[in-house]
Amino acid sequence: MSRVEDSTGTELLHVRSRWDYVRKKLKRRGVVEVNKAHPHHDMLCAIQGSIRKLLTEHPEAKAKDELLSEDFNQKIKFSVTTDTGKTYHFASYASPVFACVRSAVSIKEDDFLESLSPKDLPYLEFISNSRSGQDFYFSNNQRFILKTDEQKCVHYFLTILRDYLDHFHNYPHSLLVKFLGLYSIKKPRSRKKYFLVMQSIFYPTVRLEERFDIKGCLANRYQNPHPSGKKTILVLKDQNFMGEALSLGNQRDWFLTQLRADVDFLLTINVQDYSLLLGRHPLHVSEKKESVGNLVLRMKKSFGHEKSTQPLIEDNEETGATQNQQPDGDTAPHVHADGTPLHQNQTETVEMQSITVNQDTASPTESPLKQPSIKSPKKSPVKNNAVSPAQKRNVSFLRSLSDKDYLDSTGLLFHNRRLLVNSENSLHIVDGTDLRYYIGVIDFFTQFGCRQRIAKFFKDIKTCCGNHSTEPPQVYAERFYQFISERVV
């Protein structure tokens, strides 16, 4: 009898704790520690343990000198059991590819591991006024964000992953958010959750005073500023930014050139409803002065480059076409571009799957950077190229190598450099005349499909205009760029 009473009491306490959590979440916005009362505490502990296991026990998940087609297709799967006795099934997608991205943006694997899988330090949940419906979790040091996303968005990202990397080949200082990992986790008799790991655009957050989410439209784009004296985190929107300006000084031309390049890329992949995240705080007097030592560090970070006598990317014969992957991939066929079956060496933990590979993203008229293609398995009759992150180790993959439009001896043109600030988040920090800005483009997985067309029809009626966020990619891109560029001084 006592066992039954104890069990019932424990369940009631658990339900009460969850209700207390929901009640607190509705009352406040900000960063909340994921403690044992949090409904997703156990799952997030499983993610922490899984990431640690992935990075310490699976060498196939590490960065490579050459990215092959199977690296884009890779899926590493295993199970973990938490301290509560629950078993979760974990998967990591395209692990070597994301490892190369981390290396390219100067994130050490040890730092990534200790941030996402620290001992005895929980994740932090970010609760804001966002309407995306997704969950956001910070690493405990707030350097990285884990964001849940829908399966269709994850699948789409896998199909454009190659294009996404190609864009960074051409524009190493791109404003697009840097995705550093893609994972899924599932426990028996529940739906699978997908997590994207990205670099926080607002890191470090200590001095941030204001945050904006800008889409370039005005309908339903006003947020009441948070009352003074309350520790809440609100992201302001386009109408709040109408009377504002980005005072970038000598960084203005670089910013507009880069924003144009990023918007043009998003137009080529046919997406809309993306946002420019903008944070800002005043510069200290000492930050406006430049010491010789700091300038040397900034030059090394931004332009440091030993010229190579070897090309960064091999130029072989033109390759085959596309393949398709679902993130789960349980029933997807595995074939080469010519239709022949793909030979696989499957193990207990590694599964290779097919994804769409687009070979036609870079235009020769825009950049002499040769299009990196994918090296096929040995038994494939199709000859393919390899993506070479560091052909001779003295040229860094996706790394800033020179100043704006500088052509080095390899014949590779890398566009639109700037002098980066000396910070761990330097690619998203721009110092203006009096303010430091944190800038990045996010949420670019929405295609203009049937659902968006229907939404546009009803929003046109509701707002009596087209000044809302659901517009075709061409219209959205031009309006987005114009709205921001008009406010840059």
Image (tube, helix red, strand yellow):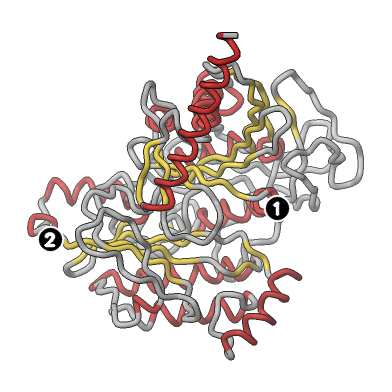
Question: Which is nearer the eye, 443 or 227?
Answer: 227
Among all residues in the image, which is located at the extreme bottom? 464
Question: Which is nearer the eye, 201 or 102?
Answer: 201
- The kind of residue on which mark 2 rests is Lys
Q: Position of residue 438 (x, y in %)?
A: 32, 59
Neighbour tally class for label 2: few under 14, some 14-19, many 20 plus, Cα within 10 Å: few
Quick check: 387 left or right of 213?
Answer: right
Task: State the CA–CA distance, disc 2 to disc 1.
Answer: 45 Å
Instruction: From this view, report whether residue 252 is shown above or below residue 380.
Output: below
Residue behind mark 2: 288
Q: Mark 1 and mark 2 in contact (Cβ < 8 Å)?
A: no
- The kind of residue on which mark 1 rests is Lys
In front: label 2 or label 1: 1
Question: Which is nearer the eye, 136 or 475?
Answer: 136
State the image quarter where residue 358 is shown: bottom right
Residue 381 appears in the figure: no
Instruction: From this view, report whether residue 323 is shown above or below residue 71.
Output: below
Q: Position of residue 120 (x, y in %)?
A: 37, 22
Instruction: From this view, report whether residue 212 is shown above or below residue 309.
Output: below
Residue 285 appears in the figure: yes
Residue at position x 36%, y 56% in the image: 428
Label number found at residue 152: 1
Label number found at residue 327: none
Callout 2: SS: helix
Q: Position of residue 207 (x, y in %)?
A: 21, 53
Residue at position x 61%, y 20% in the image: 86
Residue at position x 19%, y 48% in the image: 296
In the picture, the quarter occupied by the C terminus is: bottom left
Residue at position x 53%, y 84% in the image: 467
